[in-house]
Image (cartoon, helix red, strand yellow):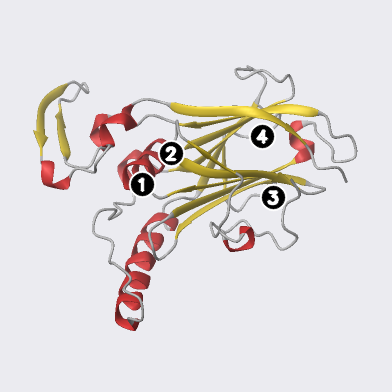
């Protein structure tokens, strides 16, 4: 699939017309894989608050393998978003305002709610994790000039869109020679500490000494977020 000509890695799905190639049941996300002459793109959208919380706290890992194997030690893997464990954004995923048709006030309230959560997130999501690219540090800035970009934002309905771009040359691919390769997308498991409504007290050695559960703060379906979920497939570049 050819990427849109006006593509910008900004966490907005507008250039994709907010439409996606596929929906994956295992991960509960919509996604599109596309390319242009220079880059490969992955755009993912999640609407379930529990899945969004999983992405925020566990990150998405996007692997590209020329061998065609699902698990390849030589694959290039890009993971995003990356947060310092002691500096998580503290997003509100539970109390999103309802947008009422014809109500300017409800739209403004939803926009404000979106803005606060986006600012909390973007103020802290400053790094991308990269493995499998020779000569590149494991952690790079989102402002890098290495050919890897990533960004994520909420819209005013609190749908979460994450976009990733990687230069074809970094993964040994070329649009003039569109060989088949495999891709593997993983939504990594989160720790119990990151589940809304569960408060863990730990000893200095990390062992759990107490668990305090507040069901009123929990997100429906959050129990399934403590395991990895993934999907993979084969892709042939749209020819230059």
Q: CA separation, marks 4 and 3?
A: 11 Å
Q: Which residue is mark 4?
A: 136
Q: Residues within 10 Å of mark 4 (few under 14, many from 20)?
A: few
Q: Quadrant of residue 16?
A: bottom right
Element type at mark 1: loop
Q: CA separation, marks 3 and 1?
A: 33 Å
Residue 196 sits above or below residue 13 on the image: above
Q: Which residue is mark 2?
A: 28
Question: Which label sits in the foreground, 4 or 1?
Answer: 1
Counting residues from the start of the chain, the first of labels 4 and 2 encountered is 2
Residue 145 tag number: 3
Element type at mark 2: loop
Which of the pair 24/60 is nearer the observer?
24
Residue 91: image x %, image y %? Answer: 30, 53
Q: CA separation, marks 4 and 1?
A: 34 Å
Residue 239: image x %, image y %? Answer: 86, 42
What residue is shown at x 54% (from left), y 60% (from top)? Answer: 12
Instruction: Report if the CB atoms under discs 4 and 3 are less than 8 Å apart.
Output: no
Q: Which residue is mark 1?
A: 48
Residue 84: image x %, image y %? Answer: 38, 42
Counting residues from the start of the chain, the first of labels 4 and 3 encountered is 4
């Amino acid at each position: 699939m050819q990427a849109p000509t006006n593509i910008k890695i900004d966490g907005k799905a507008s250039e994709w017309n907010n439409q996606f190639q596929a929906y994956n049941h295992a991960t509960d996300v919509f996604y599109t894989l596309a390319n242009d002459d220079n880059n490969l793109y992955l755009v993912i959208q999640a609407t379930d608050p529990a899945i969004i919380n999983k992405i925020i706290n566990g990150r998405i890992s996007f692997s590209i393998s020329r061998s065609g194997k699902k698990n390849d030690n030589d694959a290039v893997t890009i993971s995003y978003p990356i947060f310092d464990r002691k500096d998580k954004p503290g997003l509100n995923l539970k109390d999103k305002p309802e947008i009422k048709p014809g109500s300017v006030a409800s739209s403004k309230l939803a926009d404000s709610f979106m803005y606060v959560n986006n600012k909390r997130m973007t103020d802290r999501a400053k790094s991308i994790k990269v493995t499998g690219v020779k000569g590149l540090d494991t952690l790079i800035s989102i402002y890098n000039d290495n050919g890897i970009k990533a960004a994520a934002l909420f819209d005013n309905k609190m749908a979460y869109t994450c976009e990733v771009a990687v230069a074809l040359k970094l993964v040994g691919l070329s649009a003039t020679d569109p060989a088949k390769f495999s891709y593997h997308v993983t939504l990594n498991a989160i720790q119990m500490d990151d589940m809304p409504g569960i408060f863990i007290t730990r000893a200095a050695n990390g062992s759990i000494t107490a668990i305090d559960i507040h069901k009123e703060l929990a997100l429906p379906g959050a129990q399934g977020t403590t395991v990895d979920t993934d999907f993979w497939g084969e892709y042939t570049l749209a020819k230059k």
